[in-house]
Image (cartoon, rainbow, N blue to C red):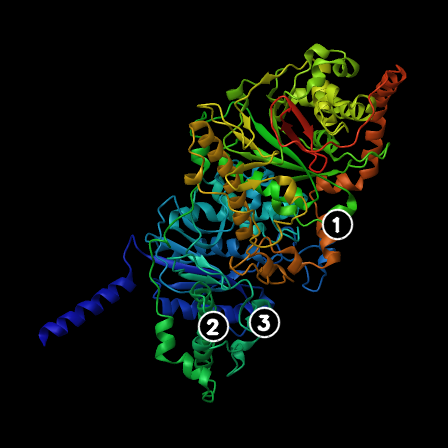
């Protein structure tokens, strides 16, 4: 009997000491709210789940209210509270707005920005709360969360100097010029948010910078655009998120990023993962029942005795409606979220002295042992603790700590789905390649195309007026957009890059392309061989350049010093126009173009323009390879150029077959899966290596699409039905999600607004002065046409332009064409 008593006493002693918390294991949980009904019911749910979960240490609500709001506020007793002066109206800038103001007028008014209360509240708590003096670890959450199990910083991997955070992949500004503008250490910018667990010393260092950077990004209206921030409204709603990421980068905090600990109801956890936190920021549903927090924005449900959120289906009903155990797991999380909220409301009503509610089946279920078992605290699994890999250190491991030169990578596309999936593939490979510097997509669109375009968030983008239809001749030649876009970028963007790397969209990067490795220098660009440009060796070069001996048969990948590019770009455009207009010399025996229709005029424009300036290239055959070609032994190619069809066994890939397929905006769309590496041709090593490279290219494209669909929050991959994403009508909700599916959030008119008026300043100015730019191009073209007319007057009898020949299926590095459908470079073998 005494032994049993001592055992019980020991257990209580452990529990008491566990809650007492001794250094260095003292934990404090924080969350930030305002004096609104909207936050009150969220507070009730979070605090209730905090108690159920067994989270150690105290919890504190950082409550931001104005004096007038506080006089009317009813919820002071809902949670342990630390009052914070409201900064929704910024005390210095007056950043404020009324909620009724339409989204279309936001650019012209002072915008209320309540999200700044989060970092401001943390700073105030650190300075003025005694609790902040007696804590070692801080867990920071959002109010719209449900805790499912203890969040213990050191158990989820947090260390002093290495906080743990959830992944917010839509913060694309960490990868582009936004980070360079707002932190001295853009390479340290982590795309994180939601769940934050860090040491108190790290928080003390970070918090003032978090607030400062939030203010800084919020004031930088010139860079609010969707393509720079990932914020579909382009209104700076997610400035606080960037304030956190840039602030952490500024003080040198690298995160352990975990994409398993937190889940949005409506999504399905990965196999083996047990999320310990639910973030119900998005709508979710079970059968015909659904819930969206924005549907309860003004709801005083906390103070309306006996009223709960609409009851969802019961577990047995859900089991009957969904046989797939994978999907069922996600549906049960949806039930757990809403039922925990309702259970919290039920207890809160009792605490307020409400009459005991009438018996109902649903109330009985919420009080049942079955529900208690379903919502008991969840423990961590090994899969839950897996963190995302960071590539920064790996990317620069083989390079000097301080790179000798700055590099910027460019690629040119148009506003069509064909280029969007190519962009997704190239951007994915760029991030993995270790390529130094930033990347910019040069997007050539007409004004009408841009209004309908949905792919603004696919890459950091510079918008360019389309020259597909030539403004003088009416000639339809989309390939001319490449030199025109490079010229436009040079004329409208200030860059400190010393070298520019130019790629095509239909490429996959496999490693860094650096000027120091491939020996590029001022006056000495580097490129890859295009041996089929036979016009460099015949009369074509003599007609179109005064230095035919300097004509290099190159293209594909270009590494050029910025000074050379500035001198060269206009010539590239002019020579492209010149060769394109010289229809008398389209013949295959002169150009190498089997279609004899001038498709490769842009390639010759490049070679002839470079020759005109006596720019001799370092020609490297170790940078680029076409999938389907046999690699040279020991060569580590840096780029796949999938301009040709290629195959492995019965599987094949031809990009031209996917010209009109929207793989980017249809959830979980992808290419047919390539074979496994074990299925490569084993006949000899050449065939095996060829097949392995082809398989790698196919798999990389599909992996890029998969990750893209995950970032778009496509939900269950087996259903291929995108989730309904919540509509944002004020800053409170929009600050939590940067990028939503445009089709669910924006009307046709709003879409035009996003596409047109909310571009970065440089891009908006571009289209405001569209006609001036076109006049400049027309004037610049006069010189080129003068030369063309001279050529024509010579009276050389040209070969007749013949119709397109039948597409040859053989390949060689000695002949080629610009695909009439693809406007791309490909190589074919002469029969």
Numbered disc 1: secondary structure:
helix
For the point 66% across and 26% down, the residue is 816
Check the image and name the residue furthest to the left: 2
Along the line of sight, the residue nearer the viewer: 802 or 55: 802
Does residue 187 show up?
no
Q: In this view, does 664 lie above or below 49?
A: above
Along the line of sight, the residue nearer the viewer: 373 or 166: 373
Q: Residues within 10 Å of mark 3 (few under 14, many from 20)?
A: some
Q: Earlier in the sequence, mark 2 or mark 1?
A: 2
Answer with the quarter of the image where residue 498 lies: top right
Along the line of sight, the residue nearer the viewer: 450 or 262: 450
Q: How far apart are marks 2 and 1 (CA)?
A: 41 Å
Locate residue 131, reporting x and y percent.
38, 59
Q: In this view, does 670 lie above or below 62?
A: above
Along the line of sight, the residue nearer the viewer: 797 or 372: 797
For the point 80% across and 38% down, the residue is 769
Identify the image quadrant of the C terminus.
top right
Give the residue pinned by disc 1: 451
Q: How crowded is mark 1: few (under 14 residues within 10 Å), some or many (20 or more)?
A: some
Q: How crowded is mark 2: few (under 14 residues within 10 Å), some or many (20 or more)?
A: many
Give the residue pinned by disc 2: 341
Give the residue pinned by disc 3: 296
Q: Distance between the residues labelled 3 and 1?
A: 33 Å
For the point 56% across and 30% down, the residue is 626
Disc number lying in front (3 or 1): 1
Check the image and name the residue furthest to the front: 831
Identify the image quadrant of the N terminus.
bottom left
Q: Earlier in the sequence, mark 3 or mark 2?
A: 3
């Amino acid at each position: 009997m005494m032994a049993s008593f001592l055992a019980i006493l020991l257990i209580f002693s452990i529990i008491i000491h566990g809650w007492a918390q001794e250094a260095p294991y003292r934990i404090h949980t924080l969350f930030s709210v305002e004096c609104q009904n909207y936050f009150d019911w969220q507070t009730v749910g979070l605090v209730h789940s905090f108690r159920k979960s067994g989270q150690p240490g105290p919890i504190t609500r950082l409550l931001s209210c104005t004096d007038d709001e506080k006089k009317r506020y009813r919820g002071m007793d809902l949670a342990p509270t630390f009052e914070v002066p409201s900064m929704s109206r910024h005390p210095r800038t007056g950043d404020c707005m009324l909620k009724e103001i339409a989204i279309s007028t936001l650019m012209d008014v002072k915008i209320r920005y309540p999200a700044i209360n989060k970092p401001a509240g943390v700073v105030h708590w650190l300075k003025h709360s005694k609790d902040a003096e007696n804590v070692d670890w801080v867990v920071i959450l959002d109010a719209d969360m449900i805790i499912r199990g203890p969040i213990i910083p050191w158990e989820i991997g947090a260390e002093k100097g290495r906080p743990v955070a959830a992944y917010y992949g839509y913060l694309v500004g960490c990868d582009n010029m936004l980070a360079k503008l707002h932190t001295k250490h853009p390479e340290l910018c982590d795309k994180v948010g939601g769940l934050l667990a860090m040491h108190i010393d790290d928080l003390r260092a970070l918090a003032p910078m978090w607030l400062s950077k939030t203010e800084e990004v919020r004031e930088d209206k010139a860079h609010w655009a969707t393509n720079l921030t990932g914020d579909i409204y382009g209104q700076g709603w997610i400035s606080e998120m960037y304030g956190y990421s840039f602030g952490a980068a500024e003080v040198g905090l690298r995160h352990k990023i975990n994409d398993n600990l937190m889940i949005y109801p409506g999504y399905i956890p990965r196999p083996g993962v047990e999320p310990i936190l639910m973030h119900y920021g998005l709508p979710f549903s079970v059968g015909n029942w659904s819930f969206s927090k924005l549907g309860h924005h003004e709801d005083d449900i906390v103070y309306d005795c006996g009223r709960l959120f609409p009851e969802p289906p019961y577990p047995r009903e859900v089991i009957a409606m969904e046989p797939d155990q994978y999907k069922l797991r996600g549906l049960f999380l949806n039930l757990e979220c809403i039922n925990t909220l309702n259970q919290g409301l039920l207890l809160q009503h009792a605490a307020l002295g409400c009459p005991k509610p009438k018996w109902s089946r649903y109330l009985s279920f919420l009080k049942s042992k079955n529900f208690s078992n379903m919502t008991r605290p969840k423990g961590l699994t090994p899969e839950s603790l897996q963190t995302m890999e960071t590539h920064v250190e790996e990317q620069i491991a083989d390079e000097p700590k301080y790179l000798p030169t700055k590099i910027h990578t460019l690629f040119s596309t148009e506003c069509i789905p064909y280029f969007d999936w190519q962009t997704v593939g190239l951007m994915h490979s760029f991030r993995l390649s270790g390529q130094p510097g930033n990347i910019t997509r040069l997007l050539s669109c007409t004004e009408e195309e841009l209004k309908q375009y949905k792919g603004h968030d696919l890459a950091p983008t510079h918008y360019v007026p389309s020259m597909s239809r030539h403004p003088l001749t009416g000639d339809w030649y989309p390939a001319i957009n490449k030199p025109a876009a490079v010229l436009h970028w040079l004329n409208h963007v200030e860059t400190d890059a010393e070298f520019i790397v130019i790629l095509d969209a239909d490429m996959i990067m496999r490693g860094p392309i650096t000027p120091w490795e491939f020996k590029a220098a001022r006056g000495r660009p580097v490129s890859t061989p295009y041996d089929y440009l036979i016009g460099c060796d015949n009369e074509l070069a003599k007609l179109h350049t005064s230095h035919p001996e300097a004509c290099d048969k190159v293209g594909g990948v270009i590494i050029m010093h910025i000074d050379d590019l500035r001198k060269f770009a206009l010539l590239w455009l002019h020579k492209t126009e010149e060769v394109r207009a010289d229809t008398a010399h389209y013949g295959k025996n002169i150009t190498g173009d089997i279609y004899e229709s001038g498709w490769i005029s842009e390639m010759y424009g490049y070679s002839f323009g470079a020759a005109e300036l006596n720019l001799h290239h370092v020609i490297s055959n170790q940078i680029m390879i076409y999938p389907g070609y046999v690699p040279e032994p020991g060569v580590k190619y840096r780029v796949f150029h999938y301009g040709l069809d290629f195959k492995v066994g019965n599987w094949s890939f031809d990009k031209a077959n996917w010209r009109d397929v929207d793989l980017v905006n249809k959830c979980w769309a992808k290419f047919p899966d390539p074979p496994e590496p074990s299925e490569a041709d084993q006949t000899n090593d050449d065939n095996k290596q060829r097949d392995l490279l082809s398989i790698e290219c196919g798999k990389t494209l599909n992996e890029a699409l998969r990750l893209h669909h995950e970032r778009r929050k496509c939900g269950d991959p087996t259903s291929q039905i995108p989730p309904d994403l919540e509509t944002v009508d004020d800053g409170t909700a929009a600050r939590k999600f940067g990028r939503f599916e445009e089709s669910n959030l924006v009307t046709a008119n709003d879409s035009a607004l996003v596409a047109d008026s909310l571009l970065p300043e440089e891009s908006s100015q571009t289209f405001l002065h569209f006609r001036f730019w076109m006049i400049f191009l027309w004037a610049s073209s006069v010189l080129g046409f003068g030369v063309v007319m001279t050529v024509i007057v010579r009276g050389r009898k040209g070969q007749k332009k013949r119709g397109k020949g039948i597409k040859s299926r053989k390949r060689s590095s000695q002949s080629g064409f610009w695909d009439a459908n693809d406007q791309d470079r490909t190589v074919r073998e002469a029969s």
